[in-house]
Amino acid sequence: MQKEIEYDEKVTITPTDDETAAHQREYASLMRKFWFALLIGIPVMLVAYPEIPWLYLPNLFVPESSEALIRSLFVLSGVATLSVMAYSGRQFFTGAWAAFRHHSADMNTLIALGTSAAWIYSTVALVVPGIFPSGTANPFYDVTAIVTALVVLGQALEVRAKGQTSQAIRKLLDLQAKTARVLRAGHEIEIPVEAVLVGDVVVVRPGEKIPVDGEILEGRSSIDESMVTGESLPVDKVPGDEVIGATVNTTGSFKFKATKVGKDTALAQIVKMVQDAMGSKAPIARLVDVVSSYFVPAVMIISILTFLAWFNFGPNQALAYAVVTAVTVLIIACPCAVGMAVPMSLVAGVGKGAEHGVLIRNGEALQSASRLEILVLDKTGTITRGKPGLTDVLPAAGFQANELLFYAASADQLSEHPLAQAIVQAARNQGQELAEPSEFEAVPGHGVSTVVGEKKVLVGNRKLMERYQIDALPVQTDVENLQGEGKTAMYVAVDGIIAGVVAVADTIKDDSVQAIRVMREMGLEVVMLTGDNLRTAQAIARQVGIQRVLADVLPEDKAREVHMLRQGGKKVGMVGDGINDAPALVEADIGFAIGTGTDVAIEAADITLMSGSLKGVAYAIEISKATMQNARQSLFGAFVYNTAGIPIAAGVLFPFFGILLSPLLAGAAMAASSVTVITNANRLRFFKAKSFAETA
Amino acid sequence: MTITEIVINGIGLGLIGLIVWYFWLYRREGIQIGETDGLQEATINVKGGYNPDVIVVKRDKPVRLHFNRQESSLCSEMVIFDYENISARLPEGQTVTVEFTPQKAGEIGFQCQMGMLRGKVIVQ
């Protein structure tokens, strides 16, 4: 019988290896190799330039250096250089051989060929100088030793810089608490965080890190979730609320039930998502793929052609020139710089996004996000908070604003209507002491009638005022204006006299205005999409600076609207809360899911924002643009370096200006070029976003 | 042109021909991997390249590839498939498993992050 196995579409099991330690080991090993090569390389170089007397130490001791002495110094150089190749340059040869067996060639091939060609030529010139035309039998062991030293140094610097580029992951992992205090058999014990089980009751004291994800059972506190959501203000949590592992408890203490542990926690999922994205491919890298598959063999061919050109058409001592230029071509070519340009920028950009709660699914999403032209924002819950809040308090003649709010809020205290609750909440937030209402009566479809203190208070709509024969004319203009802004206005009457109006509306999130301004500054056309009527929608749109509004759109039609916008040939991004907007998110070129902290596995989205702020969307686009620009710079630089460097190394400038590149300089340039690419990617770590700039 | 010059030019041109043939024109035959309990499994050693680097599988059947990186060179630290955005980090000395079920016949390439080491899965 066939064994039944369930498979996911794709499963990658990533071990949690301590990558940093591996990088440090590799760095230390490369540095040892570098110092060895340098220590041998310097005396070898002094021997190679006997015509420079101040460098030529034996001159100081042996005033007239004999030919025999020079020859024996060269023999010593040759043997010493062989040890450099065997120890410091070993990985070039093993790497080149492994690649060769697979019918491929890489940077190791070029360095191995270059250094060994120089060594072999030097040795033949030393042993049987007679077979070379006169004047060309000069050994140049220094090239082998010094180039090996430089390239190894370049690799060491590369390892170090790579560690910095991917430190976003490290930072995320460091957020994890090391231990947890759990209740087991009635006792509070401290255990490693890995040992926490689902269902454990975890105790959290003030200032402590929350170890895993869970739900509060008792106690309350304010929790700093900035490390996961990017939200700077602590969030109040009460029993029943979710807490996220790695966030920090502020002042209260509480107990919570662990609901997600290990690889299921929000943090673990974030780390996984970021790692996956860092390892993914941006479409721009496809061009590089084509180039890099032809690159190294092409350089080998150019090297041979260079040799032949010099050999056939070179000046006196053509053979020496031919060998040196052919070796220089092999050494200067840097396929690494080309290959690393895009991946390095991607790693840095994705990491930078993660630091701000922006999870970019992969390189393709990042590249598309950088090219968006239209951004569609869902109104409710995206631009606005999605729940009503008090917006206006407009007293009539003879009343003060706080007095009006006091009556309205006190009267509404017993009402369960969300609009009434919004008024009560706002008054409490302003620090108002409310009075206990008596003779409370809710009039369905009208409002409430109650007694606050000694006074009879009515809060409700126009019908309520008519019912109690209140003259509402003095506030009529205010009411009409408020309605024009899409707000719900409520009349308040005290002892038979109109006291004013209070208005309630779905309020705009604090940072929506700034975020939308940044989006527009980036040249994006921002479109609001909503199921609300046009008047309400336009009122909100005006406040946040959006010109184009698509109102009265049924939830099922959102995807069609996005489709229509795409028909115009422009790249369209859609921002939604990820659940009812899912089809529209999928339809868009880039779907942004605005999460609320924990649910990072929103499949429909290309970019997930852990916070509910639109700033995250603006930031995601900013960082995508910056990353792609960075990648293009590096790629351009690497292409220019190679397309200019290789011909110069081959000696194209020689016939015109007499300039010939030293193979030593070529080695230095090669090492520098790949380090430059990584350094450029690292600049992204200091990227300053407009969307998170402090507003003046 | 002397005999030596002719010989050296001939060797040079011959080498160019060899490079073109060996690196670009040579077609490698893939290794057909066996099937146990409906699962197509293979171990790929990573050292300066992928060994084996061309693997032949059948479609619609799960493929499980165990990558074992035996070198410290950072080049081979990641393996990236041009399919379903699959990628994996390969810590030195550890075996990392990548699993997927190819849906249609064709070629699925995999490579290191810089595209220097390459391999492919031929789906039949």
Image (tube, helix red, strand yellow):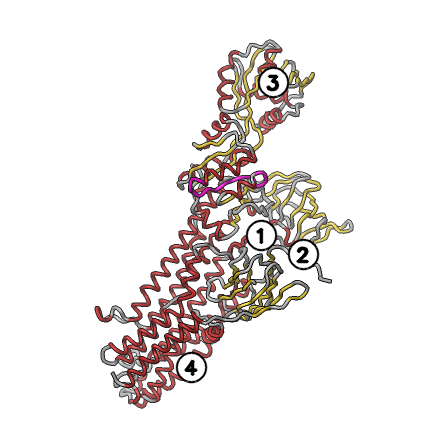
C-alpha separation, residue under disc 2 versus residue under disc 4: 55 Å
C-alpha separation, residue under disc 3 versus residue under disc 1: 50 Å
Camera-near label (1 vs 2) is 2
Disc nearer the start of the sequence (2/3)? 2
The residue under label 2 is A6
Q: Position of residue A673 (x, y in %)?
A: 38, 63
Is mark 4 in CB contact (under 8 Å) with mark 3?
no
- Count neighbours of disc 1 (C-alpha within 10 A) and say few if under 14, some if 14 to 19, many if 20 or more: some
C-alpha separation, residue under disc 1 versus residue under disc 2: 34 Å
The residue under label 4 is A82
Taking the view exactly as shown, the residue that stands out farthest to the right is A185
Mark seen at residue A50? none
Disc nearer the start of the sequence (3/1)? 1
- Count neighbours of disc 3 (C-alpha within 10 A) and say few if under 14, some if 14 to 19, many if 20 or more: many
**Chain for disc number 1:** A
Please, what is the three-letter code of the amino acid marked with disc 1? Answer: Leu
Please, what is the three-letter code of the amino acid marked with disc 4? Answer: Leu
C-alpha separation, residue under disc 1 versus residue under disc 4: 48 Å
Write the start and end of the magenta stretch as one range.
A567-580
Camera-near label (1 vs 4) is 4
* Residue A46 sits in quarter: bottom left
Is mark 2 in CB contact (under 8 Å) with mark 4?
no
* Residue A117 sits in quarter: bottom left
* Residue A470 sits in quarter: top right
Mark seen at residue A459? 3
**Chain for disc number 2:** A
Q: Secondary structure at mark 1?
A: helix
